């Protein structure tokens, strides 16, 4: 049984004080008995300003794989742990395309995050070009294989399927497409590890999820939750999606 997950990726939005106000409102609005693992991923500067509550977990949007040193502009896992971070988004398509992150480095980050006791949310997904050329599965398989190359177990790993063409565009993959790729991811994980381990990995969907399409998408086969960008910035919309996922 996989606990459903709803993770909010704020990207480069919200100052520490805006984040604090959001978290206070969210905690007020969330019921006390939710079955959903809620994760909020503010920018690094906001990690220490959110209210502490058992109703949500703290996530970061990236980290470096080295312990410390001359890496201007980077952030280490021990710095994140010191801010009570439990999850780290890795290999987001914006990191891959804008900041040129490569699968091999993403793999090192996944392994570092795991070995330091946090949970990586490894993002995979095809571009519109790859989709049109019929290469979606090939891309996803390669990203999974290389992203998980340095780990010996799938325990504590979360996979986010985020088709690049659906991120921030208002386009969502169809329920059939999401089901097909999520099932493909599960099979690929089995090939890379074992059936029992792969069956326990949460596979969440991201790409223009909102309160209008969440119901349909959460009922798609093999979808264990969402990674949400735009709609996670508005506390009412975010809580609405959490409540939809909570009902399943
Ligand atoms: P979106 O972003 O919900 O705004 O499409 C999703 C993501 O980038 O994680």
Image: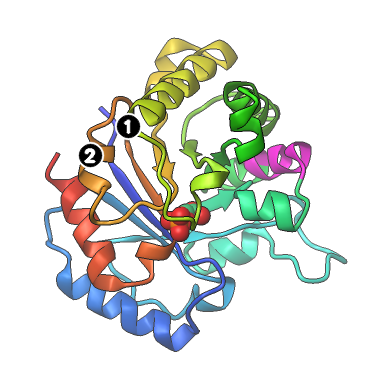
Q: Relative to residue 14, is residue 40 depicted above or below?
A: above
Secondary structure at numbered mark 1: helix
Residue 199 falls left or right of residue 243: right
Q: Are marks 2 and 1 in contact (CB under 8 Å)?
A: yes
| Residue 186, x across and y down, in percent | 45, 20
Read off the residue under disc 1. 175
Q: Residue at x 32, y 32 (%)?
A: 175
State the quadrant of the N terminus.
top left
Residue 39 bears which disc, if any?
Answer: none
The CA span between labels 2 and 1 is 7 Å
Residue 119 falls left or right of residue 104: left
* Residue numbers of the magenta segment: 102-111
Image quadrant in which you'd find residue 238: bottom left
- Pick the residue in front: 70 or 190: 190
> Colour scheme used in the picture?
rainbow
Q: Is 108 in the magenta?
A: yes
Q: Relative to residue 170, is residue 132 depicted above or below?
A: above
Secondary structure at numbered mark 2: helix
Q: Relative to residue 234, is residue 114 depicted above or below?
A: above
| Residue 8, x across and y down, in percent | 40, 59
Q: How many numbered badges does the structure rendering display?
A: 2
Q: Residue at x 51, y 75 (%)?
A: 13
Residue 226 falls left or right of residue 36: right
């Amino acid at each position: 049984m996989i606990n459903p997950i709803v993770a909010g990726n704020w990207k480069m939005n919200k100052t520490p004080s805006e984040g604090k106000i959001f978290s206070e409102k969210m905690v007020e609005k969330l019921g006390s008995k939710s079955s959903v693992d809620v994760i909020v991923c503010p920018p690094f500067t906001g990690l220490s300003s959110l209210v502490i509550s058992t109703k949500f977990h703290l996530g970061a949007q990236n980290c470096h794989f080295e312990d410390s040193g001359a890496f201007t502009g980077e952030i280490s896992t021990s710095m994140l742990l010191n801010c009570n971070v439990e999850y780290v988004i890795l290999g987001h398509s914006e990191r891959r395309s804008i900041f040129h992150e490569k699968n091999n480095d993403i793999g090192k980050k996944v392994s570092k995050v795991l070995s330091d006791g946090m949970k990586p949310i490894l993002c995979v997904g095809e571009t519109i070009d790859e989709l049109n050329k019929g290469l979606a599965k090939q891309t996803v398989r390669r990203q999974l294989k290389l992203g998980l190359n340095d780990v010996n177990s799938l325990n504590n790993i979360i996979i986010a399927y985020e088709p690049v063409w659906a991120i921030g565009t208002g386009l969502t993959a169809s329920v059939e497409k999401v089901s097909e790729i999520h099932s493909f991811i599960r099979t690929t994980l089995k090939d890379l590890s074992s059936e029992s381990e792969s069956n326990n990995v949460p596979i969440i969907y991201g790409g223009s999820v909102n309160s209008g399409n969440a119901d349909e998408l959460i009922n798609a086969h093999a979808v264990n939750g969402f990674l949400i960008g735009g709609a996670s910035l508005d506390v009412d919309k975010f809580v609405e999606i959490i409540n939809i996922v909570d009902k399943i």
